[in-house]
Amino acid sequence: MKTTNYILKLEEVGHEDVPIVGGKNASLGEMLQNLTELGINIPAGFVVTVAAYKKFIEHNKLDDIIKEIINRIDLNNIESLRRGGLQVRQLIKNGKFPDEIEKQIIEAYTILSAKYKQEITDVAVRSSATAEDLPDASFAGQQETYLNVRGPESLVNSVRNCFASLFTDRAISYRQNFGYDHFQVGLSVCVQKMVRSDLAASGVAFSLDTESGFKDVVVINGSYGLGEMIVQGSVSPDEYIVFKPTLDTHTPIIEKKMGVKDKKMVYGDDPDERVKIIAIDKQAQQNFCITDERALQLAQWVASIEKYYSKLKNKWCPMDVEWAVDGLSNELFIVQARPETIHSQKDNGKLTEYKMDDESRGDKVLLKGIAVGDKIAAGKVKIMYSLDGRAGGLDGNDFMAGDILVTDMTDPDWEPIMKKAAAIITNKGGRTCHAAIVAREMGVPAIVGCRNATEILADDQYVTVSCGEGDTGIIYSGNIEYRKIEINVADFPKTKTPIMLNVASPDMAFQFSHIPNAGVGLAREEFIINNYIQAHPLALLRHHQLNDKELSAKIAQLIVGYENEETFFVKKLSYGIAKIASAFYPNKVIVRFSDFKSNEYKNLLGGKYFEPDEENPMIGWRGASRYYSKDYKEAFGLECKAIRRVREKMGLKNVVVMIPFCRTVEELLKVQEVMSEYGLVRGELGLEVYLMAEIPSNIILAKDFAKHIDGFSIGSNDLTQLTLGLDRDSSLVAHLYDERNPAVKAMLSMLIKTAKKAKVKVGICGQGPSDFPDFAKFLVEEGIDSISVTPDSVFKTINAINSVEKQIKNKVSALTEIQE
């Protein structure tokens, strides 16, 4: 009688073998065969095939009994689901392996152990279902994984437990939700050599931004120890974002955020304790879990895996990868890779935006966390510590459709509850924890890693959960009204005049990149300094001399994870600029040097020690006059260093710098002299320098300014108030403020003509063209080179400009006909 081979070496399987080894194993085998030659490490192992699972079920005569139990389950009743799932799992766990299968598993394990010169090596035992990692559903976390399994008996038990995990409560519910037949799904098991990440770090990486679907980055999440802690949401991981287009030539880590890594999972101390959780010392918590060099190596590997799978599938195939660093060998390994299943299926022809118009909502903020998705929802808070209420709080039966789920963290058993939730809020977790993965898949807004949501929020409290304001999710008290805006990209007409965007928040940049645009006409450093850095640059550099212990303590807390105060400012500013520059690469991104007024600088941490009291800060010590001043030059130098870092280290040479509020040509030259002291020289490495044209002297002396710059950008707000001699913040003269005033238009006309003659670019960044079609018509007729507006005005502006361009074209055609 012929013996069936129920075991395959991992390197013997490939992407076409999903029916016999499941999605996870097929992917690992495919990489072992084809990507190891690129230097990508994948631990060796073997596969227990789907045929073994089916033979096990048949041998124990479980098929009909399981069907009967499953058919009796009421999937809308959590108790019924829990009871039925437990029955099925117990039946499988009590089952016995046919002798030939058990013998083959043990033989394969003995060979694997010998490969690593060990009698009984440590392995990871992972389930791999035939329906997982399909294009329309990931089934992530549906079945079990067992780590640090040693010895034949323990291995056989773990394989049997994996078989049973095909019928966990969440797997039964999930398959039902997606319309999969429980009995058409088979289970294979991967037995793979463990990577000793318990002595180093591990995590997850995606070859796209998980929230916006932006294609050009690798997002890495990592923490100390074995990777289960990240998936479980027990820690908030460190996060790195790496820009793919310049990865081969530069070191483009465009963002780094430190997580909260207070514990880790490591190997247990005795045979009955495979793994355990231990605390991490304070010093390690304040360091990133991997080096920048390691993050770049990992990003290269993830990009290579994506490239390989995209070629294999003949279409873009973003990847979701699990990685681990071995603390003994200090080598990096890829332990899993699967296709990403959310954004790869999205209709990119439609833009959806959720917008809040309540300007006073800042007063209603309850807490913040990490935003998952970009939606907004409102409802009543239901705090749950466990599904059955044993840990205090509500149980699953108290949770109604449309409620807001608030909990410490979720695991896959929570999925039946999660699918009823209007939104999900957790204390723990990062962008790749279970709650985030499932919320993304279900299209439910979630805010994870809030730390103390279960303490701050109360049962039945009505809240609004907003993931529509960038990477940071915000929970507001009460019902904040919002609008859902949907636009088809095909509806955007093409315009001859380039339309650029004004982008303040780096957190929104990836999302805004999907809007048709010609680059960024204005990226303000002030937003980044205010939100990312929070401290006055001179306070960072000189706080030790001020003898203010409270200030020094706050700064010490701010710079955790950075070598010193200067490095903190330079890197943080560079990350903010780089995130915007990468989102719109290779289009131009015009970054304006900081233009705080003295009263605004004073509001920054430590600012009161370095800022004067001015009667009229609007026309006081601001813009260019600061940059060469002995009292501020050192701080401006930090901005120059950040720009250099973005352009030269990250390779984002699409960054153009702009000098604001420059009163005289002499000032411009002084600023450029200081820039060159810090390594920023116009023309070197393609650096362009623009001038903000916002003072009448910029217009009157445009011919002289133009000799030293590459372009003008009209700041119509300041230009209007200084031309008309009014304070735009004063309600007494507000009725006189109008960008369309003949005096202002005369100024604009003069500038555009002078710029054209001098062969330098001239654009405008302001709302006027989108708010007033007649103003847009005037600018287009004058020959403006570009118009830059806020993202929410793009559609309106493009339509207005398109209409104006059509009118001009028709007028020209009519004149041509008359002349003929």
Image (tube, rainbow, N blue to C red):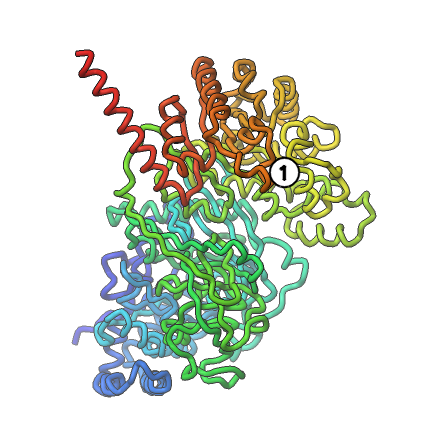
Residue 337 image offset from top left, x and y in percent: 37, 57
Element class at badge 1: loop
* Residue toward you, 696 or 141: 696
Looking at the image, can residue 782 be seen? yes
Hey, what amino acid is under mark 1? Phe
Q: Is residue 600 left or right of residue 76?
A: right
The residue at the point 61 percent across, 46 percent down is 530
Residue 565 image offset from top left, x and y in percent: 69, 44
Residue extending furthest right?
547
* Residue toward you, 187 or 493: 493
In the displayed structure, 728 sits above or below 10; it is above
Judge the density around disc 1: few (<14), some (14-19), many (≥20) Cα neighbours within 10 Å. Answer: some
Q: Is residue 308 left or right of residue 389?
A: left
The residue at the point 27 percent across, 77 percent down is 100
* Residue toward you, 258 or 702: 702
Q: Quadrant of residue 3?
A: bottom left
Looking at the image, can residue 246 be seen? no
| Circle count | 1
Residue 101 image offset from top left, x and y in percent: 29, 76
The residue indicated by pointer 1 is 596
Q: Is residue 611 left or right of residue 343?
A: right
The quadrant of the picture occupied by the N terminus is bottom left
Residue 771 image offset from top left, x and y in percent: 41, 38
The quadrant of the picture occupied by the C terminus is top left
In the displayed structure, 632 sits above or below 73; it is above
In the displayed structure, 56 sits above or below 646; it is below
